[in-house]
Amino acid sequence: MSAVLGATFTPADFDALAARDLSQSVCVVFDILRATTSMITALDNGASGIVPVISIEEALEEKSRRPGALLAGERHGLRITAAQSGSVDFDLGNSPREFTADVVAQKTIITTTTNGTRALRACAQSQRVLVAGFLNLRATVDALAKARPTELFLVCGGTFDEAAYEDILAAGAVADALWDAFAGAHVTDSAAVARQLYRAAAGDLLAAMQSARNGRRLLADPLLRDDVAFCLRRDTCNFVAELGADGVVRRV
C-alpha cells in the first residue's frame, strides 16, 4: 500500500469518510473554534474522558447511562438550553474557558456540537482517531512522527456546511511538520493547499482570523471574543488526545 497524506475540509466529506475503509488509517480531527480545543482543555484540567455524540437526544440518552457526567455542547455557538433539549439546560457550552479544573476534574463530559463531534464519529472506524488543536499540536505531530502511519487523514470540522479557515490552518501546520516524512507518498491537493495556507499565515494566526467566518463571528461577540486567542495558543498541552474504541476521548 502506498502512503497517503490527505485532508478534508467540509462536513460534506463526513459521509464519504464514514463509508471508506479506514482500518489502516489514522485520522486527526480539528475543530479549532472550538470543539476540539474545548476537549483538549477539559482533559488538561483533569476531566476523565469526553463522550462525543451527534445529537441532543443522544446526549440525553448517554446522560441517563452516566448520571454523574456533565452535559456540554452548543447550537449556533451557544450553550444548549432546556428549550432546545426539552428538559434541561446543559452544564457547559463550547467555550474552552468554561472547562476549568474546578468544574471538570474527575468528570466525564458528554458533548454535542454542530460539526466537531460529527467529524469524530465519521472517523470512528479508523485505526486511530486523534483530537487535535493548536494547544497540543506539537505533541500530536510527535506522536504521528513516531507512529509513521501509512495513511494519514487530516479532518477539518468546518463551519456549518462550509470549510473553516482556522481548521485548515491547523491541518496545514501538521502537514507542514510531517511533509518530509511523506516524501514520495500520494499527497492530496487538499493537504498541499492546507500546508501552503498555513505557511502564509503562520506568522500571525490571530490576524488570520479576520479571514475566518467563525473567527469574525466570535471576535464580534464580547462574551466569546477571548476564545479566539485562547484557541490559537501553541503547545500549552503536552499530550495526545485520542478517541478510544469505547467512544470516549482520553489523554494518552
Image: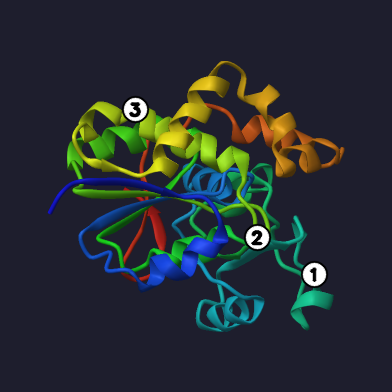
Q: CA distance from mark 1 to mark 2?
A: 23 Å
| Comparing labels 1 and 2, the label whose residue is closer to the camera | 2
Q: Secondary structure at mark 1?
A: loop
Q: Amino acid at mark 1?
A: Thr
Label 3 environment density (alpha carbons within 10 Å; few <14, some 14–19, many ≥20) = some
On the image, the x and y values in percent for residue 181 come to 21, 31
**Image quadrant assignment for residue 186:** top left
Dot 2 crowding, Cα within 10 Å, few <14, some 14–19, many 20+: few
Q: Residues within 10 Å of mark 1 (few under 14, many from 20)?
A: some
Residue sticking out furthest to the left? 1
Q: Measuring 71% from the left and 33% from the top, which residue is drawn there? A: 211
Viewer-nearest residue: 70 or 188? 188
Tell me which numbered mark, 3 or 2, is placed earlier along the sequence: 2
Residue 248 image-quadrant placement: bottom left
Residue type highlighted by circle 3: Ala
Residue 72 in picture, x, y percent from top left: 64, 62
Residue at 78%, 41% (x, y): give it.
218
The location of residue 6, given as percent across then percent down, is 35, 47
Q: Is residue 127 above or below residue 153?
A: below
Q: Amino acid at mark 2?
A: Asp
First in residue order: circle 3 vs circle 1: 1
Specify whether residue 109 is in view: no
User: Which numbered tag is attached to residue 161?
Assistant: 2
Residue assigned mark 1: 81
Q: Are marks 3 and 2 in contact (CB under 8 Å)?
A: no
Q: Tell which tag, 3 or 2, sits nearer the viewer.
A: 2
Camera-nearest residue between 68 and 149: 149
Tag 3 and tag 1, C-beta contact below 8 Å: no
Query: Which mark identifies residue 196?
Result: none
